[in-house]
Each structure stands twice: as C-alpha cells, then as structure tokens.
Image: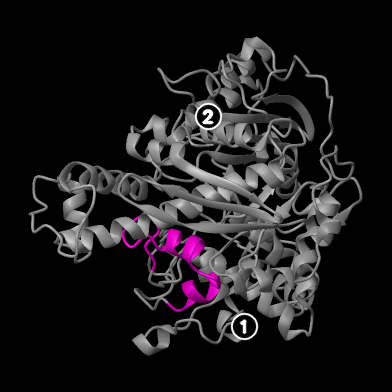
Amino acid sequence: MTSADNFFQILEHLVEFRIKHLPEKLGDTLPDIPLEGKLEQETLDKLKEFGIEDVGGTLELLFNLLGMMSAFIGEDISDSHFIGQRFAQDKLKVQIQKFKFQDFIFLQAVGHHNLSDIVKRFRVRRKKDGLDTGVKLVFADIDNRRVLFREGMGCTVTFRKRDRKKLRAQPDMSAYAPSYKTCKNGDLKLGSVVDHSVVDEDQLDAAIRGVFEKDGDTERGTKAVLIVHKGKLIREVYNNSETPAKYNLPEVRDDVHANTPLIGWSMTKSVNQSMMGAMIQQGMFGDYEKFYRLQKKRRISDGAIMEEFMKSLSPREYLPFLSNPRKSGFRDLNMNDLLHMASGLVWAEDELPFDVFQMVYRERDMARYAATKGIATPPSSKWSYSSGTANILAGVNQACFTKQNKTLKDYWTFPHESIFKPIGMCNATFQADIEGTLVGSSYCLSTARDWARFGLLYMNDGVVLETDQRILPKGWTDYTAMKALSDSGKDISGGIYGAQFWLNQAAKKDLDDHNRDTGYEGVPNDMYYPRGLFGQRVFIIPCMDLVVVRMGSRDKIGLKLFINQVVKAFKNKSNCQLD
C-alpha cells in the first residue's frame, strides 16, 4: 500500500452523502432518491463501474469501508501504544488523543473533514492483552474490533473470540520484543563528525528543515529524518521536544526518539523480500551456490544469475491453491513474476473494491485471499502494484519452512536471527495475520536507526561489513535494482520498480510527489528504495554511499525535492549518473 487516496476520497464522499441526503434514522424501506447530483461525479462514475447505482448499494459499500477504516485506525493506535510506546507517561485517554492528532495528519491535509471527525470519535478501551476499538457516529455504530497484542509479535486485528484463542495458543515470541535500547550490532556508526570537505552542512540542514516545517496551515507529519554517509550517521532529527528549533518543527511536537519503533507500511515488502533472500542464502530454496557456479560459466552478471534462479522457482510448488494462469492459456507463474509485481493476478490496490484494505482488515488468511483472486493478464505482461503479491510471497516463505518440517516459531524467529540481529535491527517487530503468516505487505515496525541499518545491508551488497557475514546471496542486491521486464525484455514498470524495491530509472524525472510514475530529478539513477504509505522511505544511493531515512504520517509533502536537496548538499558526485 503506497497510496490510499482513492479509498479515503470515496469514503469521504459517501459519508458526506449519508449525512446530507439521508435521514439520521433509516426505516426498513430505504429512500428512493437518485444518486446523480448527490455524489461527486468522479465518485459516482467509480460506483457505476463497480455496479452500484442505488442507495442500498451505496450504503452497503459505505458500511464496508467504514469497517475497514475502523480496523485501520485501531491497528495504528494499537501499534503506537503497545510497540511505539509514544507518550507512555500519559494516561491512556490522553495518549490516545495525542495519537489521533499526530498520526492522522494526512486526513486534514487533503481536506477529509468527515474522516477526521471519525478519528476524533474513535473509541478505545484497554483490555488485558489488547485494545477494544470502534467508532460511534451520528448515523451508525461501527462494530468494535479487538486488537490483540503479543510481545515480540505485535498487534493483530481479530474478529471473533476464537481468533484470540488461536493467537494466544501460538508460540511465545517475547524474547524477540524490542529492546528499546541502542543496538550494538551492524555497520551503522553513531556520533559521527561531518567532513566539511564532503558536505555543505547548511544546505543539508535546509533540506531537513523543509520536511518538518508547515505546508501552509498543515503539518507535514515528519517524525524522523536520518542521513547516513559511508556508514556514518551524520544527521538524526526527530519530532520531539528536545530537537533544536532550527529545524522548524511543529509547535505541538510528537514523542519520537532514537529508540521509538515506527511502522514501515509498504517498506515491509522490502523486508519480506530480504527474508526470501536470506532463505536462499541458507539453501532453503535449493542449492543456489551450485546454480551460481554453473551459470557463472556463461559470463553473465550476478544479478542476471539471480534472475534466472528466481525464474526457475515455482510459487505453486509451495502454494498449490495459487490461481493458475495455465487455465487461461498462459504460462505458469514463477517467483520472478511475483517479486517484480508482474504476476497477472486479479488485484485492485487503490480502486474499488480496495482489495488491500479487504485483505489486511477483513481476512484471517491474507496470503490465501490474495492467491485465489484469479488471473487477469499473462504473467510478466503487465506491471501492477499489489500488496496481495507481497503476502503471497510471505505465504511462500512460510510454506517453505513447513515443507522442511520446521515449526511456526522457526519461521517467525528466522528474520530476527538471520537478518535483524546480525545487522543491528534490535527493535524490529514483524507482525503476522491470524493464520500466522507474516504480513509481508505492511506490518514491520522498527526505529529510524534500524531502518537505516536495513538500507546499509543493501548498500553493502547484503554483507555486514563489521563481521564479514553474508546475509543475502551474491547477486541479490543487483537483482533487487533490476527493472521489471516482460518475457520479451520490455520495461513494463517504466523504470520505477525492481524486485520489491522502487527505482529511479524512469525516463522522465521531476520534483512532483504526485507523479508516482516519474523519477526523482537531480538524484542519481542508481537510487533504489523501500517505500511505504504516508511517506515512509529508505533512500539508498550506491554511487554516493548514502542512505537517507524519512518516517512520518503524511505523504506528498515535497519528498522528491527533499532528496534532491540532500544530494545537492554533497559536493562530490563524480561517480554518479544523473539525467
């Protein structure tokens, strides 16, 4: 999920329609009124495309979307309370009010006043091992959802008592809960002195200031910015009361610090991808070392060798229920198709019926939901961003453990033992759905420093330099930055997407955050990055040995300009190609 604009726009319009044009209390017979002139034309057209043309269908959709939004708010608040532990010194009621203000700035920024009101009315009650969440509106009382918290596994939206019983019976992961301390492992060097011959500090600070200061009358929602050059942390700025005034932070500050875990949203897709890479490195998907040696004789690049290996792996071997393209006369899916968002599977990310919200907030088994949607186009013929695909990959990872007679706890501890611990991500939480599959699309939380460490893992070719330990196999990071291509070699993403990471290889580049299909003007072509909802970013620029982290609660605030200005602050870019 990199954008939810259409979801919130349609929900806003439906709430407005309900308030303005229907009585507060509805009887058994719904009013027979035309939708024309009562709804925004763009929304009306979208509803008609989806087969909704009357009041009954409109209300059914409204309550479905409200239920999803209620679960979304509940998950966000639960993550902030239990894992982030922001404003922990406050009583729960005060803490929740602060979360509502700080974490939902994006609704105010785009004028969704009705949805902001829903957030204000959102109710939270503390339970023994979770929060009961729900919202009471003038015209509706949205069902409560229990968000269950487990140490080391984080928060899970549940639907029935049996869901909570099942979760409580799953393995104890409390030993892997965040430490809330400075991590010692890995390659990130703290407290580094800036080399003035390399970077213009005033220009760098101006770039950082630009993503904290107000955007007109609205906050930009930035929670943290980190700049890491050659493994050294040279800037670390948080939205909290201790940060110097020179960064023009909001008047009402957040409570984010170096040891505050923050949700990565769709940056989790890149973490999920790294898990598959680490599993390959450990031989879980076959003998890659043997495959590599044989292919190397062809004198092709390490990235190309990895691509061939991923094409040789069949997801259906692990998930037999996965929709079968052969039934539509197409070739079968391979792992390369999934990693490059070119599966051809049916999916609507930010359009009706909003499969991503349905999957994450209404389904117990997210991988199965995504895997059984059906086939839309031949594999590799079209690029289509899909959170469902990421959870299919997470399901493949889990099934690989099951095929090798490993336990659910083996699967859950793997990213901690094989990735997080070696690279120093000691505050990471990777949340799972009710069936136990890690939510590879959306739900990894860690500190801004830890997200920088994740970027350094890819900067350093999948190796922890401090210990010389290879986490990811040879060719994996090169493969990550290879464009999504069709079987005939055509660039199907326009140079914006690799293997679960975003790229800066688009032909057209600009500084407009609203243009997802263009690159970043003035930024090296070799930049690639995890990207998440509400502006979560870990920019990796190999030619500059530069990693830049931005975490926040609002997108489209000038992030393209921000990274452009950060790059300009560095004086030597002779090794870089800039269009």
What's under tag 2, amino acid-wise?
A: Gly
Which of 487/226 is in front?
226
Describe residue 328's horizontal placement relative to residue 532 as left or right.
left
As for residue 133 lying within the magenta part, the answer is no
Residue at left 41%, top 52%?
Answer: 494
Q: Position of residue 519 (x, y in %)?
A: 45, 40
- Residue 369 to residue 37: above or below: below
Nearer to me, 35 or 205: 35
Query: Which sits in the foreground, 196 or 219?
Result: 219
Under mark 1, the amino acid is Tyr
Q: Which mark is residue 569?
A: none
The percent position of residue 165, horizontal first and vertical second, equals: 67, 72
- Give, as a single range, the part of the protein colored magenta: 347-372
Vertically, is 149 above or below 319?
above
Marked residue nearer the N-terminal end (2 or 1)? 2
Residue found at x 70% / y 79%: 400
At horizontal 66% and vertical 59% (from top left) the residue drawn is 431
Real-space CA distance between mark 2 and mark 1, rounded to the nearest whole angstrom = 41 Å
Q: Please tell me whether mark 1 sits on a helix, a strand or a loop.
A: loop
Q: Quadrant of residue 173?
A: bottom right
Residue drawn at the location 8% of the way across and 54% of the way down? 33
According to the picture, the residue beneath numbered tag 2 turns out to be 221
Name the residue tied to disc 1: 318
Q: Is residue 355 visible?
A: yes
Residue mark closest to the camera, 2 vs 1: 2
Give the image location of residue 181, x and y in percent. Answer: 85, 38
